[in-house]
Amino acid sequence: MKKVLVIILGMIASWTNAQQIDPLLQTSGDQLAQVAWVDSIYNSMSLQEKVGQLFMVDVFSQDPKSKTDKVKDLIANYHLGGIIFSKGGPYRQAKLNNELQAASKIPLLVGMDAEWGLAMRLDSTYAFPWNMTLGAIQNDSLIQAVGRRIGEHSKRMGVHINFAPVVDINTNPKNPIIGNRSFGESAANVTDKASAFFRGMQDAGVLANAKHFPGHGDTDTDSHKTLPTIGFDKARLDSLELSPYKRLIREGIASVMVAHLNVPALETKDGYPSSISTNIVTNLLKGELGFNGLIFTDALNMKGASNFSEPGEIDLAAFMAGNDILLISEDVPKAHARIIAAYRAGDISEERLALSVKKILKAKYWVGLNNYEPVAEANLFEDLNTPKDDALNELLLEKAMTLVKNDSAVLPIKDLKKQRIAYVNFGDDSGATFYEQLKAYTKVDWVKANSLEQLLTKLKRYDKVVIGFHKSNENPWKSYKMADNEVVWLYEIARQNKVILSVFTSPYALLDLDTLANFEAVLVAYQNSDVAQQLAAQAIFGARGINGRLPVGVNAAYPAAEGLDTKAIGRLQYGTAASVGLDPKLLKKIDTLTRNGVWAGMMPGAQVLVARKGKVVYQRSFGYHTPDKKRRVKNDDIYDLASLTKILATLPMVMKLYDRGVINMDTEIQELLPDWSRSNKATISLQRMLTHTGRLRAWIPFYLQTLDTVMDGPSELYYSKVPNDTFSLQVAKELYMRKDYRDSIYEAIKESELRSRKGYKYSDLPFYILRKYLEEFYGSPLEDIVQRDIYEPLGANLTGYKPLERFSADRIPPTEDDYYFRMQAVQGFVHDQGAAMLGGVSGHAGLFANANDVAKIMQMYLWQGTYGETQFFKPETLEAFNTCYFCENDVRRGVGFDKPQLGDVGPTCGCVSMTSFGHSGFTGTFTWADPEEEIVYVFLSNRTYPTADNRMLISSDLRSRIQQAIYDAIIR
């Protein structure tokens, strides 16, 4: 026994004392068992079985049974060592994998090309960014993370070796086969990225493979179709093409794939493929570079190899050259027989055969095939498409974005006031996602024209033009080129406009432009995926910083490693729930709750938005504008916010004046409105008004005094169907009120009696009063003040009073079939009767917006008065208004803000922090912000349509149940 142990230890020493530590040797202390297993299997094998281990054939899980049965026959008759899966689907492959493994006496080594993830070959699986995109990232730990994640996906699929990473240095932009598959043109960057990638993958228990040795990056032909020539001298090859291999071999990469290349500096035989060259495989790779891991040929059915020799002969030549595994032989039976014949003839020694076969067995032990387990089909799709993958993909694409040019710091676009921005689409793929994301920040118009002259004319009215160059994201080989007419159009648009060019394809696309002189900014997003488009738009508006670097040069002025940095300026981002610590699967409960609410008739439709840590991670629209289901709710539809107006219009303007010291909590109504000094409300303070403890009446039904009780509708004394100098306040469609009645409304408030009881009573009246005060203080209508000072700087371009002045009615869900006052469906006009009688503008109601714009304002509050580097008021001001001053008196309210319940009943789920705040609205709206969990929640609906008597939304507590679902989704 002791003698056996000494022999085994000696074998381990011989493996590890070579120039490279044996990458296939277990590092977990299980080396003795590994050696024993390898020897026991090898010694039990026949010659036919040993030779069979050298072959890895391709299998398509999408193929019919007749084809896959042929692979089973090869396994049974020729004892294959492995299979490489190609096109198909995950469930089909898992099932086929298990069948093929069951047919094999010795477990098969399973390989795949999954350079950017399993999606390279399989449908319904994850695609991470291409290597060129990853090459732009400065933080290599992210590359290691994606390598590990791809390794975990591969392992879940029963794949043991992923033929990645590509370590070719793409110094030739015309390379037809590598291109985006390369990390770039810099040997150092390619090496760093490849090192991080393979270490991540092997940490996951999957063998990595460096390809395509000795370097396929500087060719302009495809070895799948012909034999490319690498015509550089040995010094150049040593310093550039071979550079990554030297380090990766030292670091323990498990395998290398040898390409089919003609390399005269390394092989003197004219036109002799590198894959069958002893000089290249044995003398260089194994000898000079000291590689002891598995050596694969590239696919032997590729024209670069198959054109050279007959099936069987090419396989033998490849093995004789020093390769261990013969990948995708054109004829396994012929090749198998030819190698056995060579062995029996003495051309192949037992030592040579054992070297390769034992390496293969060692690799099988390394990946756990000594204890083979079939692939579990349960939850396979979910395991291969996780929230973790989404979060990593988002982060990778964000960190890759590269700003090539940024004259006068045009990016990020900071000042949104009065900015007119156009978007123009170039390329042959869609830019719709990019455009929709741009619109999330401010008003952006998609400008189209049939001729350059028409386009230039249309663009004259815009301050900035964002051009998206969009090319197919289907695979990395798709063309990145600009059409000749596109180049002409780009030059002319840039000459006459301030242009931000965003490139959604390879940076090589910029080679088609001789100069970038007239472009103010050039951003490279690398791919045209939805996520890349969203992130580019976010970067343009400063929601995200930019710090990528070009992996390849695009002209002399912009070489590889160039790139400019920008910093995020504090605007809402849009992305994945997992990236901010929310479980997206649990967030889906919102879908169920809201759909059930629509189905039950609580409201015709709704918008729901959730943001956390400054990132919108859930934004959905449900149902229809009306119960007849004629128009679906969209994310950019505009809802009547009702009492959300209080905290989204009036309150921020009051806070700004508080911030300036114009008013304070003790400021009394008589100071705000001196002509009220004799009113019973004169000494009510701002604090008392806005905490609803000022004894004011809840509301006054002003409209009742203006009805014709005989005709049962608006009285002609107060209303007209057509506007004129007397009747100028529009209340509804074809309904105008006397403009002097506004004074009557304020007089009624001024003269109204106070409640006899002290304490809390929610009231609209303080916000009527504040509207009057703000307009007198600023000398402008409230709708103009808030637009100028709040919504325009925020980019809340869908927010405002009187929406029909800017938007069509079909974007605005109606709020009621009003049969008691306006005698019509109320659509595009404020539902609240008092606000309507003031021309649609009041401090308590009248505001319209979508959920996204509401979230901007609430996020500004969460960021303590700052948004997009604009400070609306100081943090201390927000704290003053978000304080519960009368909690000891059982009054939960802040100053203007609603606050969480103090007992069991209240406006929230009871799961929020006590520092949280928000408000609800009569039409079925609600918004809430929680500083401690950094959550913004927005719910907009028109529950009052067709009748305000419908209180099911309120009685069901649906809005609070959705809020509970959000908090349940927090990953603790």
Image (tube, grey):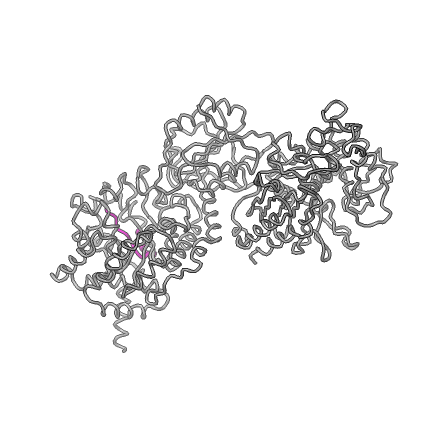
Magenta-tinted stretch: 245-260
| Residue 694 % position (x, y) | 81, 45
Q: How many marks?
A: 0
Q: Position of residue 804 (x, y in %)?
A: 64, 31
Residue 291 % position (x, y): 27, 56
Looking at the picture, tell me which residue is in the foreground, 178 or 697.
Answer: 697
Q: Is 570 in front, or is 621?
A: 621
Seen in the picture, residue 622 relative to 511 is either above or below; the reply is below
Q: For the N terminus, which image quadrant?
A: bottom left
Above or below, comparing residue 597 to residue 632 in the picture: below
Name which quarter of the figure residue 688 lies in: top right
The reply, left or right, for residue 453 in relation to residue 202 is right
Q: Is residue 392 visible?
A: yes
Q: Is residue 691 left or right of residue 56?
A: right
Residue 247 lies within the magenta run: yes
Q: Height in image: 642 above or below 912?
A: above
- Left-right relation of 801 to 542: right
Q: Residue at x 54, y 37 (%)?
A: 541
Which quadrant, please, contains the C terminus? bottom right
| Residue furthest right as drawn | 678
The residue positioned farthest toward the front in the image shown: 710
> Is residue 945 part of the magenta span, yes or no?
no
| Residue 777 x %, y % | 76, 32
Q: Along the horizontal axis of the image, is 116 left or right of 326? A: right
